[in-house]
Image (cartoon, rainbow, N blue to C red):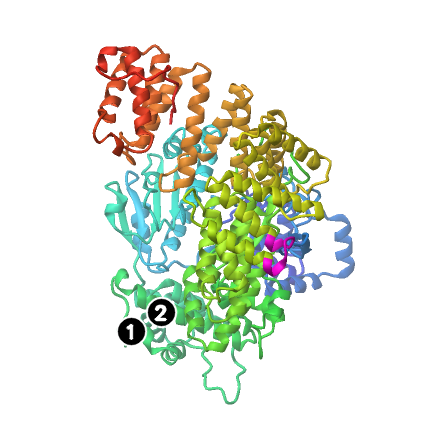
Amino acid sequence: MEDGTDTVSGSIDGNAPAGMRELATRLRTVLSRAGYGGIREVAEASGLSRSTVSDALRGNRATWATVTVLLRHCGVAPDASWKRLHEAARRSRHEPDQERADRHSPEPEPVPEPVSAPVPVAPAGSPARTVPGPRPPSPATAHPGADAGAVGAVAGAVAPGVPSLRAPYGELPHHVRGRAELLRTLEAADRERVHVLCGLGGSGKTTVALELARVARRTGHRVLWVSATTRGALHTGMRRVARELGVSAAEVEEAWAGLTSAPDLVWRALDAAERPWLLVLDNMDEPEGLTDWVRPGAAGLTVVTSRVGNPMVWGAEAVCHPVDVLSPEDGAHVLVDLAGQAGPTEDARALAERLGGLPLALRLAGAYLARSARGAGLLRRRDGDDAYVRDFAGYAAALDRLGPDLLDRGERLGGPAGDDERRLRRLVGRTWEMSLDLLEAQGLPEARLLLRLLSCFAPAPFPAQLLDLDTLEQSGLFTGAARAGGCDAALESLVDMSLVRVEDLRLGETEDEHDTGGECAGEGACEGPMVLPCLVAHPLVLEVSRLNARRAGAGERDRLWRAASLVALRLASVDAGEPGMWKVWDLLVPHLRAGLRGVPDHDEPTLVRFLSAVNLAHGYAVVSNGYDLQEELAALFGEKAAALPPDHPAALHARQLALRDVDGSGEGIDTAHALYEAAREEHGEHHAHTVQARHSLARALYATGDLPAAEREYRALVSLEDDGPVPEALHHRTGLITVLAELGKGDEATAQARALLSLVEEGRLDADDLSARHHLGHALDVTGLYADGERLHRRVLAELEGAGARGSHLHLHTTRMLAENLAAQQRHEEALGVLDGLLHRYGAVSPAHERPYNERLRLLDRRARLLHRLGRYDEVVEQLRRLLAEFAPVMPSDAPAALNVRYGLVLNLLHAGRSAEADAELSALMKDLGPEGPGAEERPEGGAALRQRVVALAERLDPARCPGHVRSDGPAGPGSTA
């Protein structure tokens, strides 16, 4: 720790102006509450220089940019009150002295402000345009010590944010009430047990863990705070723990690729730590499948916060500590801490009892009364029937007036947590409504409307820059006293009242993934992540707000959903053709999905706007090769479009989207023909809708195996180019090339592929769509133009990586095609390296995720074949045995896939010279295949052919093994390994 002059609690310059001393005092208080002890620590966390921090805390000098950074790093909003305090401090300095200080004092490094920056957006069928949005810092404004890769951004550098391991000390109240005994228990807790803080949502579990973290930090412990709200958040956090404890990036990458146990790796590092630690896994409310991460440690204490209190879930090594609601006495103390002397203690006690002792409800009620004490809501209408609420008794009476059903017909709250959840939710909902009433009385009626607007979407981070004032003004939601221009102040007040928080999501390459081993592959590719401010509200807040919106009048509900539909279109205006925005789309899709599911069916224009937005999301899924998302959104689109007349364009489009799922059964071909004929009759042959319908027909014919008919349709689509540009022309040509190759017209297919490549390279055919170039690469491969195909695959991959889309479906699929291309060129070692890297990306996939699971199996099959061709038979044997072990829990040993793997295992055992093992495996395989004769035709498809190969192989090894069997012609081939 630094000496007394270099700490947050050190002395203030007595010669500083009074206003500067007041500002310094307030900043010191905020930093102390956030858990900061020394100036060096503050400087390192905020990115400011030590001299800048010292000047601000001694009262010598503090620019508004410096104050803003310090406040935000403490979790405090730099609101209007702080701005006024800073302005008063600035005025308190004599102007000439100020100018002299400006000339001679070091200016802190520029801090990024939320200034305007272009964000690519484009409606369907139009070029990209720009809209205002937060601009990320440029490299020139990097603060000292900043990671070069973390400064500066472009819209294309996006990926999920990486959270900090620092506990959010700024969320702690001045006093933690009613938890002294529990905290003493935890401070003396047995390290050989996991300690689970469990209870009702909003009961203060995280607050207890934070207070424990603050005590542990002061006693020299390393505090590791990991969010466990989702599986992904937990995995990301524990990955950071491993790196924090010195585990190498290579070991982490290997573990997270599924090659070793990631939990074991992290816990070895924790157990070997020299410094004692406290590990908090916060909000693990869905522990199923995650408990392997939850272990006791020899060097520290493990604490989990969760709503799940069943000891059987956590195992014998865990101790569950219920965190119940507060007693009326402790609840009264919480209210007095927040609201001051807003009435006698017995009134505070009565209100705490009425609120059921739920800490979340107590906090919001106290905040309401604290603002009332400052005059909020004092000025009222003469004919208004609401009393001015400024004390505990008045608040309790207002609760009765606003909703006596909150108390469930007068029944007292405070029983076991599981029994009271429904009633407590309703109670908290009324408390939030009262907070919104207070904001409305302050002249901010927009606050309630904003919260209800957010409740139309998903309980997930909502990009604030896409909730712009222009859209809000056009929405028609803000009528009467409410104005869209007041939304900015209303949002700030929602944050002040803890109903909404602003979370900066860092979109860029995830940790340890940004190094591609080569040069940056595009403009801006080497710049750091983009910071995207998002609005986040507690799911319960949104749920209650949504419920209250449903209770509103029909006209108000309709206005709300009309506004939400315009916001949905604004969200969907992000350019899906730009890979750099795909991670932004990953944020947007849940909101569009939730909005379409919730929108009422009776307002056709509103429903159609939501359908249009989801259709654009479907377009993102198409260009990024997100097949599962395509199917999901197409099904949702069809479900909601069913409310429209059958001949409505959206209803017809729903039928067309469903054609993407046409399989070999032939179902859907009649629909595809009908949609094409209807479009041609209404719009003409060359209209974009007709071209799209005909392309859907061609794809459906190809999927059902009618290659001649598919060829006819694709040729007709290509011929349309004679009359001018055609949408998706590159897709039409690549489709034709693929069909020609499968029809055995190799020479023509090759000629067409060469001609198409020339058109693209000469710029005579639009090829900006990376997905289209991906398909062009496939067309080059199927025609044997492997060198050209390899060059195109590598170019597509480089562009995707340069745009930060390394983890996209398109990147995975193109990488697989590159591996196949290299194998076809007999460059097996290179192909194996590419394939191994791809398998690392897939990691361990659960069979519950059918498509990626099957894709991983196909990759393992290709890997086994490559190893076989390289003569590395023992490696093939080990891989196939691991694969069979993986199959064991999900399929019987005589399932077709397992039988094929076992046949490949026999072959490779023979090639490896391990004949005894091969003989044993072959005998077991023949037994599971069963004898020839009656019943053989009922075996799974392909079973008979596999048995023929197995029997032929057995005869070659030992003719006596198969007496009476008529041997098939030709030697047994290598067969399929998977």
Measured from the top left, where is residue 594 in percent x and y? 46, 59
Amino acid beneath label 2: Arg
Could you tell me which quadrant the C terminus lies in? top left
Q: Residue at x 49, y 57 (%)?
A: 654
Q: Quadrant of residue 896?
A: top left
Up/down of 160 relative to 690, above or below: above
Measured from the top left, where is residue 387 in percent x and y? 45, 83
Residue 272 seen in the figure: yes
Work out how far the residue at label 2 is from the one at label 1, CA to CA, in angstroms: 9 Å
Q: Quadrant of residue 418?
A: bottom left
In this figure, which residue is indicated by the disc labeled 2?
426
Up/down of 890 relative to 574, above or below: above
Q: Is residue 480 left or right of residue 272?
A: right
80 inside magenta stretch: no
Q: Is residue 425 left or right of residue 501?
A: left
Whichever of callouts 2 and 1 sits on the residue coming sooner in the sequence is 1
Which numbered tag is attached to residue 46? none
From the viewer's side, name the closer residue of 50 and 799. 799
Which numbered tag is attached to residue 408? 1
Predominant SS of the magenta segment: helix
Q: Residue at x 37, y 57 (%)?
A: 204
Please report the bounds of the magenta region as a residue range: 681-690
Up/down of 619 relative to 596, above or below: above
- Which element type, helix, strand or loop, lies under badge 1? loop
From the viewer's side, name the closer residue of 177 and 458. 458
Measured from the top left, where is residue 342 in percent x and y? 43, 75
Q: Is residue 214 left or right of residue 306?
A: right
Label pair 2/1, CB-CB below 8 angstroms: yes
Furthest-bottom residue in view? 383
From the viewer's side, name the closer residue of 11 and 337. 337
Residue 583 seen in the figure: no
